[in-house]
Image (cartoon, grey):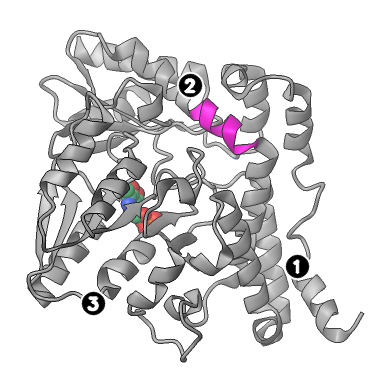
Amino acid sequence: MDKRSFLKNVGLMGLAAPLSFAHLERAVADVKHLAPADLAAEEDFWLKVRSDYDIKPDYINLENGYYCFMPRQTMDHLVEHMRYINREGSHYMRTVQWENKNMVADKVAEIVGCTAGEVAITRNSTESLDLIIGGLDWKAGDEAVMAEQDYGAMLNHFKFIERRFGTVNRFVSVPNHPKSDQEIVDLYASAITDKTRLLMVCHMVNITGQVLPIRKIADMAHARGVEVMVDGAHAFSHITFQMKDLDCDYYGTSLHKWLSAPLGSGMLYVKKEKIDSVWPLFAERDLEPNDMRRLNHIGTHPVHTDLAILNAIEYQNAMGLERKEARLKYLQHYWTSKLRDHPGVIVNTPVEMSRHGGIGNVGVEGIEPGDLADALMNDHGIFTAAINRPGVRGVRVTPNVYTTIEELDALVSAIKKISA
Ligand SMILES: Cc1ncc(COP(=O)(O)O)c(C=O)c1O
């Protein structure tokens, strides 16, 4: 082995340790015969998964939407990578850093069926999406379409672009219970004019958990010459999809959300032929046309985080994304179906399985969202997130795969008590 390949191999130490997720692999082997939708309700299996997580006993955590913390094994790998890179120092940075980062991009790209050349590893959704919003060549009078329910950081960046370049932001308001995909497509179409340049849309609305019909919106927008940027902060590694099926131009997500990668990891996808139309935030040297690296010159950064993304993917692969998706949908459906028709309770997430994942939102008539979240936490030991946004007033409830039915029963009982 020459010196370089030795270093590379050492640099990859621990990235693909086959036994590291043996516990999960054994548990999955026992239930391989079950379809994901049937396994979703097998509490014995999910209790085994739960034991991979260090869960605080102080409260019931139904706020995994901010950050899906890592299972113990991914965390151990992260610490190992940190130790290793601290020992290697600049040597690692000057030898295999970029090769390894490309490998990470490759593995992330595999999840959604695109090429590594269309993917940049970023720190989070904010960086990914703001790179596009801030990197397009805006001219005065250009218009962008977005929703009142979109994430604040992106809306703020669009506001800033409006002030800086004299562009115009147009808003739609996404209904919580659409009658059809067409209703949503027509809504976005109604905000497009002949000056519209970009349409931003959430794949999964973070405050309600509603999944939007991205492909249909993209087809409509493209037919009118408008580019589509998808905020996939909550959809990636939560629901199964392939990038080619969405046919969007840009897609940003955080890997520390549903992939359970370490904090500070994200992904930006740019359709190959669009890469050159985005100005980088930090300049890169001249590269071949449409080389994704031109958008990804971030300087020296915590490379151990990049490496642990591979371990997070390994963990997810051992579980199987389809099993994970089915479990998350099942959990959401479990608690929302017990509350949907309860007097005084308002569920702000659509009922159809195709329109939601694991996130749900519930309000109680006459109670401010902040007060509801406080009552749940202080009186019932249940941690949720208060949401008070246009058309959405309630608490966001985000279980993770390890959440138990007993925990959701506690939520249902607490909401019923509060609404009474
Ligand atoms: C829809 C949506 N977009 C973007 C973000 C920003 O994610 P991050 O803080 O990881 O950049 C979030 C965070 O919760 C979100 O829910």
Residue 254 found in image quarter: bottom left
Is disc 1 in contact with disc 2, using a CB cutoff of under 8 Å? no
Characterize the local packing of mark 3: few (<14), some (14-19) or many (20 or more) Cα atoms within 10 angstroms: few
Q: Secondary structure at mark 2?
A: helix
Residue 145: horizontal and vertical position, in percent?
Answer: 17, 54
Q: Secondary structure at mark 1?
A: loop
What amino acid does circle 1 point to?
Answer: Leu
Q: Earlier in the sequence, mark 1 or mark 2?
A: 1
Disc 3 under 8 Å from ligand 1? The reply is: no
Disc 1 under 8 Å from ligand 1? The reply is: no
Q: Which residue is mark 1?
A: 12
Query: Is 342 positioned to the left or the right of 32 in the image?
Result: left
Q: Earlier in the sequence, mark 3 or mark 2?
A: 3
Residue 342: horizontal and vertical position, in percent?
Answer: 24, 8
Magenta segment, which residues? 320-328
Q: Which residue is mark 3?
A: 137
What amino acid does circle 3 point to?
Answer: Asp
Report if residue 235 is visible in the image. Answer: yes
> What residue do we see at 46% from left, 26% from top?
329
Q: Secondary structure at mark 3?
A: loop
Q: Which residue is mark 2?
A: 330
Residue 242: horizontal and vertical position, in percent?
Answer: 51, 46
Query: Is 95 positioned to the left or the right of 180 in the image?
Result: right
In this rendered view, identify the residue nearer to me: 391 or 20: 391
Name the chief secondary structure element in magenta. helix
Between label 3 and label 1, give the one nearer the viewer.
3
Query: Is 388 positioned to the left or the right of 5 in the image?
Result: left
Q: Which mark is residue 215?
A: none
- Which quarter of the rendering shows the N terminus? bottom right
